[in-house]
Image (cartoon, rainbow, N blue to C red):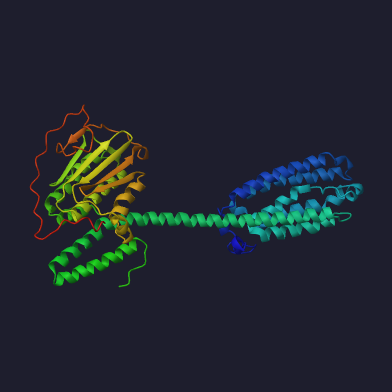
Amino acid sequence: MGAGDRLPVLPGSGRTHANAGADGTASLWKALAVLRFVVLAQALAVNLFRWERFDHPLTGWFVLTAISAWTLVVTWAYDAPERRRWPLLSADLAVAVGSILITPYVLSPEMLNRHDFTLPTYWVTAAVLAWAIRYGWVGGVLAALVISPADIATRAHVTSTTFSNLFLLLLAGAMVGYASLLARSAAADRARATELAARTAERERLARAVHDGVLQVLAYVQRRGNELGGEAGDLARAAGEQGELLRALVNGQPMPAGGGRGQYALSGQLSGQGVQDVRAEHSGQAVDETDTGMIDVGGRLTGLGAAGISVATPADPVLLPSEVATELVAAVRAALDNVACHAPGARTFLLLEDDGEAVTVSVRDDGPGIPAGRLDQAEADGRMGVSRSIVGRLTELGGTATLSTTAGGTEWELRVPRSATDVPSGSTGLRWARPGWLAGRRSAKPAAEPAAEPAAEPAAEPAAEPGAERDAKADIG
């Protein structure tokens, strides 16, 4: 029976008042309010042209005045969901039946023999439709069955026209009632979808935080434990199992059968740069935040500079709202994380640009690149470095994350449009942390901005462990 499987709530049910609130039928109640005044106008017009033939015209106009006043009262009453209960609906139906039953007293015998309109004409349909909207097709049919005997009782003789009109009334009650059930079903589905979307967004946020912190630690413990062997090997296996369980949990997947700000310091330890990167982490935290909640992204990125990492930022501050700046820098950290974990020894270059329409951060390294198809496989395996920590963050900010990879290196372009942040843009002049590293990537530096003094050459990068082979970023995330 489709939506009709959800039976209507009948009078006396304990759920009547609870379900009288916003249930997707608000538009139907508004349409009914308009219909009441339309059929009232029709009833007044019809009786205006025939009142002189009434046996009791004074009574007729009294009844018409009464139903006009009732139209105003009941329209106001139905406007509040908590008042749409069976006492009000019963009163509405009683007024309709009473206005029909008074017809033989008001109309003349000649009018009754001619099968003329009843006194309220089509105005009584509003009460039937009110029951249909409130209690579904069952309520609509029941209300129509109450009206039908009253209408037949006023007729001097019953014709096919009488039954046709009553059949249409039954049909209208059933159809509008069924439509109200569909509206309730759609509203419930929409509420569930909204709740699911909120839960999914929260899961995505937690997944990024977990990836940036716990999963990185577990991956490091697993890698080092396997290298050390012995009891550390048991610890490595346990860390690997827990990492898989945690990935399945944050991805909402069945459990396998058998973001922290400190995560970048851990990545530096993996690449032999722990001391310098921890210092960079703390220097990044020291960047001033304005009293308007804006953060200079350039200052945060400068704090990431270390041996093997060159940073170029505009001379003027690039201000973004605190939440946007934090997420953008976190995505950059995730990209640096992949370089440190999967291409140890590779040089990394950060470039911050503000063209007035968007803020763009480019993260480029000279590692071996990412093999074709590896990212899709990583996401299928539940690894979230790219799909969640980078792409997911930029997507939520309304921006884009573009990846370019070749055998000579990998480049991420993280772009956040200013239309999504409503922040005035800063200068596009560049401050070069290490001159020349962008040669070949940009056509030319802005002529109006002189280059800053070259930064001191970083300390020599630590030599790779004997027998170690450059990882082709095979375990993205």
Tell me what residue is drawn at x 34 percent, y 68 percent.
Answer: 255
Q: Is residue 48 found left or right of 24 in the rendered image?
A: right
The image quadrant where one finds the N terminus is: bottom right
410 relative to 430, above or below = below
**Total numbered badges shown on the rendered structure:** 0
Tell me what residue is drawn at x 22 percent, y 30 percent.
Answer: 446
| Figure quadrant of residue 82 | bottom right
Residue sitting at the far top: 448
Tell me what residue is drawn at x 36 percent, y 57 percent.
Answer: 203
Viewer-nearest residue: 294 or 250: 250
Residue sitting at the far right: 110
Q: Position of residue 96 (x, y in %)?
A: 75, 52
Viewer-nearest residue: 50 or 382: 382
Q: Position of residue 476 (x, y in %)?
A: 26, 56
The image quadrant where one finds the C terminus is: bottom left
Q: Is residue 77 found left or right of 383 in the rendered image?
A: right
Residue 133 in sight: yes
Tell me what residue is drawn at x 84 percent, y 50 percent.
Answer: 103
Q: Position of residue 467 (x, y in %)?
A: 10, 61
| Figure quadrant of residue 221 | bottom left
Viewer-nearest residue: 220 or 443: 443
